[in-house]
Amino acid sequence: MIDAWAVYRKLPFWMQDVLITIVNVNQYRVRRKGAYREFREYYSKSWDKDKANWEVEAEYRLALFLDFARAGSSWFSSVHVSELSAFPVQEKADVINHLYDIATIDENSAIVSLTGGTTGASMKVLYTVEDTQERFALLDTFRAYHGYEIGKKVAWFSGKNLATDGDVKKGRCYRDDLINKIRFFSTFHINERNFDSYWNALERCSPEFIVGFPSSVFDICEIADRKGLKLRNRVKVFFPTAEVVLPQHRDVIGRVLGCKLVDQYASSEGAPFILECAYGRLHIHPLSGVFEVVDENFKPALEGELLVTSFTTHGTPLIRYRVGDRIKLAPPDECCECGSTFPLVERIDGRTSDYVLSPENGRVNLGNLSNSTKSVTGIIAFQVIQDFQDEIDVHVMASDLFTASERAKFIDALRERVGPTMSINLKVVKDIPREKSGKFRIVKNRLST
Ligand SMILES: [Zn+2]
């Protein structure tokens, strides 16, 4: 098969820009036709609805969706009542192995989404056009609430390998959508050597908004921070995608770009949404679907794994789908100053598979591990790899400030979490490679794979 990206990267820059503009404008046109406008209005009015009001609406949408799945999908036809608890838990493996039993539409009439799974298995889901339009309407409403509208200048950092090493050296670490004013940066070449290329391109573009992987934007900002640089024209908002946002991301990115960081949760297979409000709190959007948080025995819990039921997955219905992420809910009686009564989430903990298994303490999840850098200076990034039950390798990218005493502090903090008997092999490294998808993983547990 011809690698389309490889061919693309050989064209002159101006032609690459024109092509990416055409593809993008066309994609935007499809996403924002049809039901889009109606859903934009629906979601703009949703945020401050009364609790009684949205609860009824959410129940109604759920019932409609479950009826639809039972009637339209052979996978769900054996479920006899449209009650959520009557549906079995849906695993990723079910979607991978039985897509055509679960899907209600033909691949030809669908918008196909491909995701790289955690285990390397690629996963495919089929969306209806209308569901895509609804998802973008909600996402656009959320971004508009924080100031962004299409056409405002935005820099995008997602996993597209759109530049070559040579391009980046020439300062061309990006491609431009000239009509929607989007600068797409390659996230595959960010390092100390290419820093000037990225920094100058950012300065010249002077974006009002940034969207993309927090770890990529953080990498640029972290180098800038060490050099004492700040972006001349401050960015208004950074919308991170696809990865867990860490406290140090907020800190450093905020300082260097001068922007607010506004988080969201949604997955490419179509999970419902969790969105950050103007007061920095995360709210479940109950009109986009149902989030069940469960413990190891699948009993309801405040903190644990997510089962999602998503109202925008008519093409490939996701019902009680084990999406593989963990969250912690806020106490149900907590209110938010923003005025919305949508349920509050305390934090998003990321992937369930990202944990260290401690002989004494059991699962130590990503959120907990990443906190161990809190009082330690000099750590740029770190990754924990567990290949054995009683041993972890910790790779640290560090600055000169990471002295022997900081190192000891970090090990103490890790020790507190992983327990007294675990061997901790800490190694300072020049670079920590990313995954094929371009994402950065803090924890790699290879015990179970
Ligand atoms: Zn709020």
Image (cartoon, rainbow, N blue to C red):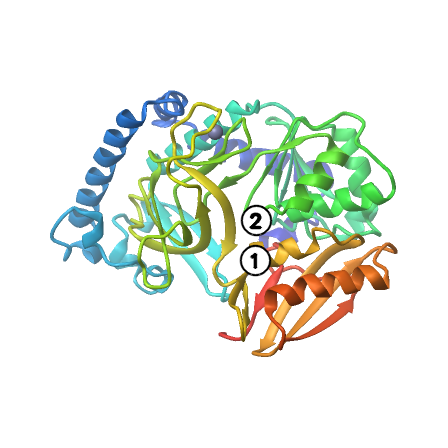
Residue 441 place in picture, x, y as percent: 61, 59
335 left or right of 390?
Answer: left
The N terminus - image quarter: bottom right
Q: Residue at x 86, y 60 (%)?
A: 403
Q: Is residue 142 above or below residue 251?
A: above
Q: Is residue 359 above or below residue 125?
A: below
Is the distance from the Cβ of mark 2 to the nearest ligand 1 atom less than 8 Å? no
Q: Which residue is mark 2?
A: 244
Picture disc at residue 366 = 1
Q: Is residue 440 visible?
A: no
271 left or right of 370?
Answer: left
Residue 46 place in picture, x, y as percent: 37, 24
Picture disc at residue 75 = none
> Which of labels 1 and 2 is toward the front?
1
Q: Residue at x 33, y 33 (%)?
A: 287
Residue 412 place in picture, x, y as percent: 71, 64
What kind of residue is marked 2?
A: Val
Whether tag 1 and tag 2 are in contact, CB under 8 A, the answer is yes
Q: Is residue 447 above or below residue 275?
A: below
145 left or right of 66?
Answer: right
Q: Residue at x 56, y 34 (%)?
A: 22
